[in-house]
Image (tube, rainbow, N blue to C red):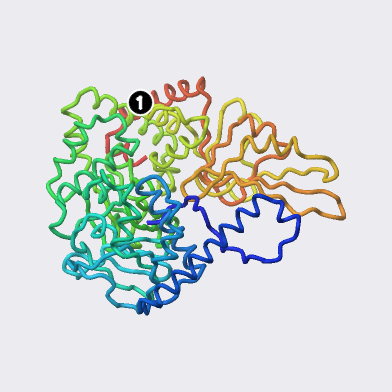
Amino acid sequence: MAVTGNSPRKSKAKHIDKETNDEAANDTDNDNEDDQEQHHEFIKNKSHATRKENGDTSLDLLEDDIVSAEESVQNFLISTVGKSNSKVYDILSKHGQKLTFRSHDSILKRDESENGLFILLAGKVNVLTSDGSEVMNTLDAGNVFGEISTLFDIPVTAAITAASDVTLVKLSKQITVELFEDFVQDLDIIDWFIQRKYLPTGSDVDSSRVYRRLALKTFKCINLFQTWTEEMIKKLILSFEHNIVILYPKGSIIVLEKDPLTSLYIVISGEIEIKQDSRIIRQIYVTAEKDPFVYTELALMVDGKTSPVTVKASTNCQVIQLNKELVIKILECFPEHMETFSEQARLFRISFQRQGHIYLMNEAYLQIEMLSSYLRQSPFYASSTVQQLWRIILNGDLQEFEEGSGVVLEVECEKYESILVVHGEVLQIHKCDSTEPDSDDDDEAGQSNITHDSDKVVVVLEAGEKDSEQDVSNDKQTFSAGTVIDMETITKMSEPLKANTACLLLKIRKCENVNKTDAHTENKVNTAEKAMSDDALNMV
């Protein structure tokens, strides 16, 4: 699937003016751009003439088509082999075939020998199971398919049908092999399946090996298992009695609200929606380029809890369901790691005792796996270990705020070292005299600006329009979900932070305050455990 990356050409080519002025003629950069555009135009015209001479009845590729297809191929190369190819534009111009299909048309049939690379320009296609009875995945514009049978010289592994009217660009097998020949020489077919998170649909690939290796790769990138050895993870994988990766069809329920929580759910690919009281509160899309989504650590850490939300598959989803009993069984074979897990569970119980009501109301946003990934993207916590991140998160204070309310008190600046925006937005408005130079302010603000795009940490700086009557401009700094704001930056702000929307914040304590809180709350937990049964404790 397409990733968000830089492509050599992301916008339409500019028309070339044959009568350039003297100033432009002396501009070397402009000359180079013009030469490149002229070259592209020459290639396009030549390839059109060649296809016409050969009796090719496919549609003509327009400049927009070539640029769009090139971006998709470049993104595909970056996500699979780690680098782009400067020849892609020329190859598409010379050899690309533009094809269209109506909804329900067959594009690729399983086991057929004709193959090539297909770049989806518009519409959606369905990837079918081996018998063609179920949809395994749905691909939309920007995706690339057909490469497995082409690169590894095997029959088509899965049938592809049009889920809507479709426009695509096809490259022949020979051209596709030439395009990839410098990249995939040492890559075997199972490696490719794992990298792309493909599920096997036939006998061309050992499905058991694919499932096991996909699970191994998945567990290794989850913080909860960072302290596990490869031996432990392999032992865990081999303990599964069924296929470790489960395919949940579109529309199926993965977890139902109020069901007992006994398993950890790891979404490897697909789109899910999280609902509470029939209201969608969050949508998550996991692709081959994104880390898995984990729901919920609460099942492993605290007994007797029920799910506060429903998790539903919006598309076909690949999911690993990991039972707590299986995790404990493996840990019992490795006592030193059981101690680490017990410490994590202890910290979780302490935090839950302090603010369990907020956990239960905001379960969809409070996955430690996700909070850890947010913190790791901040320079303040990038080098923290897994254990340190757990302690930082679980010793923090969760606070909810209504829209328009202030989010930081002056006295809190001594208590906390930073704030993580878990959900919603926080806004800071800086008023300044537009007649005065503001370069220093910009530089200072830039030091704390990070950008938030899907799963990346971001702080967006938007310049407000100038008020001509008052000669005052407003700089709006919006801190979105996933942003870490250090307290030193907050204390330097000329205006207080306010909730731009209803929001949930995690206020991270300074190191000297963490141990005090930990010890104080642990005493409360120990006292509570002595006074109450486990069932009563789980009702907190």
Q: Please state the horizontal and vertical placement of residue 200, each as a whole percent of the image.
A: 20, 56
What residue is drawn where x is 57% and y is 26%? 415
Please give the residue where the numbered disc 1 appears in the rendered image.
527
The extreme right residue here reads 469
Q: State the residue in front, 57 or 427.
A: 57
Please report the residue visible at 44 percent of the width from the left and 63 percent of the height from the top. 69
Image quarter in which the N terminus is found: bottom left
Can you tell which quarter of the image residue 229 is in? top left
> Looking at this view, is 428 or 517 the one in front?
428
* Number of numbered discs visible in the structure rendering: 1
Snapshot quadrant of residue 497: top right
Q: Quadrant of the C terminus?
A: top left
Above or below, 116 relative to 483: below
Relative to 20, 520 lies left or right: left
Residue 12 appears in which quarter of the rendering? bottom right
Image height of 267 relative to 325, above or below: below
Quick one: label 1, few (<14), some, or many (20+) residues within 10 Å? few
Establish if 199 lies above or below 530.
below
Residue drawn at (39%, 58%) of the image: 275
Kind of residue sitting beneath label 1:
Thr
Q: Position of residue 485 (x, y in %)?
A: 58, 36
511 shown above or below 323: above
Residue 481: x %, y % from top left: 52, 46
Q: Residue, x 42% and y 51% (percent of image)? A: 85
Looking at the picture, tell me which residue is in the foreground, 466 or 470. 466
Element type at mark 1: helix
Q: 45 or 57: which is nearer to us? A: 45
Q: Position of residue 143 (x, y in %)?
A: 38, 61
